[in-house]
Amino acid sequence: MNELPLFFILSIYIALAAIHFDLHGFDQALDNCQHALDIESKSLPLDHPSLAVTYEYMTTIYERLGNFDRAKDCLNKSNTIDHLRTLVLRSAL
């Protein structure tokens, strides 16, 4: 059996996270984001924009759960990835 493409699996986890978020199932949304993040961190470069987006989603979920320390950590990770990506792109010019 062929494996599903990575982007398809990640898309499923992120879509499930969005559905749970909309239904106020924040813990389930967070679990799906964590699954996506686990896959992304093992298979993508550490400065990949997909990681930053997943951390942004997790920031919002942690805010809704009232866990502002974790939200801040995720936001910082997202911003760090965005900053690294900007530096890499500028150095290529």
Image (tube, rainbow, N blue to C red):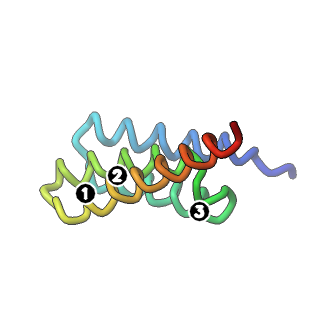
Q: Residue at x 38, y 37 (%)?
A: 18
The image shows residue 85 at horizontal and vertical percentages of: 56, 47
Q: Residue at x 27, y 45 (%)?
A: 60
The image shows residue 55 at horizontal and vertical percentages of: 41, 52
Q: Which three-letter amino acid code belongs to the residue tagged 2? A: Met
Question: Do tag 2 and tag 1 residues touch (Cβ < 8 Å)?
Answer: yes
Secondary element type, mark 1: helix
Secondary element type, mark 3: helix
Secondary element type, mark 2: helix
Counting residues from the N terminus, which is met first, the one under dot 3 or under dot 1? 3
Q: Quadrant of the C terminus?
A: top right
72 versus 21 height, above or below: below
Counting residues from the N terminus, which is met first, the one under dot 2 or under dot 3? 3
35, 93: nearer the viewer: 93
- With 89 as the anchor, is 14 left or right in this view? left
- With 57 as the anchor, is 70 left or right in this view? left
Structural crowding at the residue carrying mark 1, measured as other residues with C-alpha within 10 Å and reported as few (<14), some (14–19) or many (≥20):
many
The image shows residue 51 at horizontal and vertical percentages of: 52, 51
Q: Please give the count of numbered marks on the rendered protein.
A: 3
Q: Residue at x 47, y 49 (%)?
A: 83
43 versus 53 height, above or below: below
Residue 71: assigned label = 1
Q: Which three-letter amino acid code belongs to the residue tagged 3? A: Ser
Q: Which three-letter amino acid code belongs to the residue tagged 1? A: Ala
How far separated are the C-alphas under marks 3 and 1?
Answer: 19 Å
Counting residues from the N terminus, which is met first, the one under dot 2 or under dot 1? 2
Q: What residue did someone put label 2 on? A: 58
Residue 41: assigned label = 3
Structural crowding at the residue carrying mark 3, measured as other residues with C-alpha within 10 Å and reported as few (<14), some (14–19) or many (≥20):
some
The image shows residue 88 at horizontal and vertical percentages of: 62, 48
